[in-house]
Each structure stands twice: as C-alpha cells, then as structure tokens.
Image (cartoon, rainbow, N blue to C red):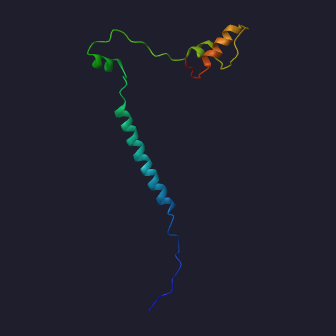
Amino acid sequence: MIDAALPPLSPIRPRTTLDIAIGLLIGIILGAMLAFVQRALDSSLKNPEDAELLIAAPALASIPAEAQTRAARLLPANGSKRLKGNDQRTQHGIALLQDTTVRSV
C-alpha cells in the first residue's frame, strides 16, 4: 500500500535562524582566535621594561609619545583650516604637512 505525498507544513531549507546563529558563533570563535594569534605574533616593545629585558640593561631615558601632529599644532583649535593673517609660506607649509601621499626618492 502506498500513501499519498503530503506537502510539508514549513520549508525544510533554508533554516535562516539556525544558519545565522551558526554563522555568528563561528565568526566570534574565528575572531577571538585571530586576536589571540595576532597578539602572540606581536614582537613589538610595549613599555620600557620590555626593552630592558631585551637588551639586559637599564633604560636611562624615554621619549614621550607626541599627542598630536605638527600640522594639528599649527592649525587653529576651532577646526578651521584658515590661519589668522595671510602668511602664504605658513599656509603652504601646513598644506605640505597634511599631504599624506608616499613619495620615493
């Protein structure tokens, strides 16, 4: 005896909520793994103690990090790109400092 085929009440594929949940879980796991691998492969010096351990000698001095670029110090604090006065050389210098294109010699 053969029964008649009945259509399913809900679609079998795609299971969007399950697919999204699995994709999100895999993305979080791979992102965390990549972050750990990147940190493990980072060989840069983070603080003076790292440098002292590397060269087996005490640090005599350190250079503080510069908080802002030279161009930012020369521009007005209000964010305007216009300088007070008409000093063309200073304006040209700031334009050169803001140019970030790479040049080769």
Percent position (x, y) of residue 87? Answer: 71, 7
Instruction: Check the image and name the residue furthest to the front.
Output: 105
Q: How many marks?
A: 0
In the displayed structure image, the side of residue 99 where residue 17 appears, left or right: left
Quadrant where the N terminus is found in the figure: bottom left
Q: Residue at horizontal 47%, vertical 60%?
A: 18
Question: Measured along the vertical axis of the image, is residue 83 above or below residue 31?
Answer: above
Is 72 on the left-hand or right-hand side of 27?
right
| Residue 75 visible in image | no
Which residue is at a point 36% across and 9% down the rendered structure image? 61
The residue sitting at the right extreme is 86
Tell me if I can see residue 38 in this picture: yes
Pick the quarter of the image with the C terminus: top right
103 lies above or below 59:
below
- Residue 37 as seen in the image, left or right of residue 10: left
Q: Position of residue 10 (x, y in %)?
A: 53, 71
- Could you say where residue 94 lies in the image, as x and y percent from the top left? 64, 14
| Outermost bottom residue | 1
Image-quadrant location for residue 60: top left
Does 102 sit left or right of 59 as displayed? right
Which residue is depicted at the point 57% across and 14% down?
70
